Image (cartoon, grey):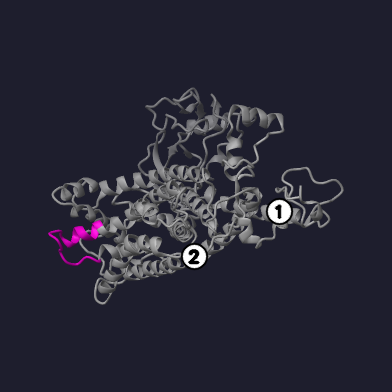
Amino acid sequence: MSFPWAENYEPKHPLTKWIDAKLPLPRLVYNAVGAGYPVPRNLNYFWNFGVLAGLALTFQIVTGIVLAMHYASTADGAFASVESIMRDVNGGWFLRYMHMNGASMFFIVVYIHIFRGLFYGSYKAPREMVWLLGVVIFLLMMATAFMGYVLPWGQMSFWGAQVITGFFSAIPIVGDPIHTWLLGGFAPDNAALNRFFSLHYLLPFVIAGVIVLHIWALHIPGSNNPTGVDVKGPQDTVPFHPYYTAKDGFGVGVFLVVFSILLFFYPNTLGHPDNYIQANPLSTPAHIVPEWYFWPFYAILRAFTVNWLWIPAKLWGVIAMFSSILLLFFLPWLDNSPVRSANYRPAYRIAFWVLVLDVLVLGWIGKSPAEEPYVRIGQFAAAYYFAHFLLIVPIIAIVEKTKPLPNSISESVLHGEAEEAAPIGVGSAH
Amino acid sequence: MATSEYVDDPNQRPPVIGAKEEEGAGPRRRDFLNIAAVSFAGVGAAAVVVPFVNQMNPSADVLALASIEVDLSKIAEGSGIKVAWRKQPVFVRRLTAKEVSEANAVPVSELRDPETLAQRTKPGKENWLITMAVCTHLGCVPLGVTPSENRGDFGGYFCPCHGSQYDTAGRIRKGPAPKNLLVPEYSFKSNTVVQIG
């Protein structure tokens, strides 16, 4: 962090001095998440979700490594090995339910984290790179989650793999060869299962690497805050430790309570019972849906039902679905409003909440069967999703009359009580 | 510093990271809360470690006692067979009268792992020596279950890995192994059938 009032790491003990001289790792930690990282003093609880996402990834990696010790990635043995984890392995049910529901928790906190960024304008300059890396992480998460869902080799695993790899067969001319190449066969089988397992083990570590870049990029300008106003001086910040370690600690406690309720009392509520039936390549389940975190995108995929402009409906659906995420890469340049926080943008704030509602509707449609009236509602909701980013946001940025911004973070928090503007132990107001 | 007016209220003093508590001020309520919260989190984290360690122990299907029955009728005197029990080999050997008397002639006090043949067999069935075929040194399978194999200097078993030698009661007599060949739990179902496990 480049704020001049950031405290420098000064080891006192000869041993820590010696370590710091050879390998300045303590210095790195101190400046990243210690007292050496000044953070806006007005962050609300929505700023807990980055740390919570990191925690969720840690849970997934730890439980995943352990589950891989008992899992067999063969088309004949995968389903039985998962059942053996549930019944025979000591505490196996706990580890697997933690991994299954941990994925849901990961997506819940990441979706809140993304919408936090959308509301407070965290994607705007100077934090575009933070946002871009975040979208990369989100894409990697989706790929990892999809491949993980295939591994138990239940009915939903198999038909999910069939459908999702089928996207690639929509590509003109080379689609079918690519599809066959991805699967290593003509339908999901041993070859596909093995490569999915290999990549499912690899990608979380790639995600961890991109998270390092994400945090690195964040620490150049420093964290955004609920006012969206830049930090002006030391009175606007407090050290990350102990102030935000304590606040994040509280958030972690709440996260663990929610996670525990899900894990111990509703472990299968977010799953699908058909996935406890072994994969059968000759019979598709009557109602096939992806995991809940893919529902909105699944609705966009299914929104195209007729061929249009010489392009078949199948290809339109796939293009739309991928575009709905790739679109986010362009958001920092689609929204040209200089004001970051929606608290000072009355029109954008309405558009934001309509978008939240629209994504929830898309989720509901993605979960519903492909029949009327759901298809029609899904088409309108999908159209609105694109309109939000491509029309509404750029237009609002031009026409909106924003509210006056506070002069500084401390002024907005303390309403002008300059006397108290210096945080305890940091300031030099007198 | 602009903090002087806070110092009198112990809850308003800046948090102290590390040792340097102000002299004479004593612990603050916040110190107590910090220690309580971090300790509670530590206990919770330690509790979660238990299943992650325990999952590496044998699972229920491995522990399920797969007991096996062995037919003794085809084993000739002086010979034996190797059978698999819990994925490990077991020697079932029918001793000759000479081998039994050799085993009984050894003074127990001279043995590295003192046991008599009677302690290692069932009453009235002293000629049936049933032991794990796993050398107590580093786990190789010793030779000597059939007369054609090398039985070592003591007529029992000889481990080809590091030269441990066992006598006709399966007791360690020479070489690096520390213990006698382990006797598994077994019982005679009839005169010709024994159940191991």
Magenta residues (range): A303-319
- Decide which of A320, A127 is in the foreground and name it: A127
Using the rendered view, name the quadrant where residue A297 is placed: bottom left
Identified by mark 1, the residue type is: Asn
Mark on residue B159? none
Is A228 included in the stretch rendered in magenta? no
Label 2 lies in what chain? A
Question: Front-most of B63 and B18?
Answer: B18
Q: Residue B115: which quarter of the image?
A: top right
SS at mark 1?
A: helix
Q: Is residue B144 above or below residue A266?
A: above
Asked if residue B77 shows in the view, the reply is yes
Residue A202 appears in which quarter of the rendering? Answer: top left
How far apart, in angstroms, are the residues tagged by discs 2 and 1?
Answer: 28 Å
Where residue A94 sits in the image (x, y, percent)? 49, 58
Q: Which mark is residue A262?
A: 2
Circle 1 sits on which residue? B34
Q: Give x and y (percent) for residue A375.
A: 25, 72
How packed is label 1: few (under 14 Cα within 10 Å), some, or many (20 or more)? few
Residue occupying image coordinates x 25% and y 73%: A376
Callout 2 crowding tier (Cα within 10 Å): few <14, some 14–19, many ≥20 = many
Q: Is residue A421 left or right of residue A202?
A: right
Q: Nearer the viewer, residue B197 or A106?
A: A106
Give the residue type at disc 2: Leu
Residue A170's x, y, as percent? Answer: 19, 55
Q: Nearer the viewer, residue A178 or A24?
A: A24
Q: Is residue A170 above or below residue B133?
A: below
Residue at figure coordinates x 72%, y 32% from the top left: A13
A429 shown above or below A264: above
Point out residue B94 in the picture as x, y percentages from the top left corner. 43, 37
Residue A148 can be seen in this image: no
Q: Is residue A304 magenta?
A: yes
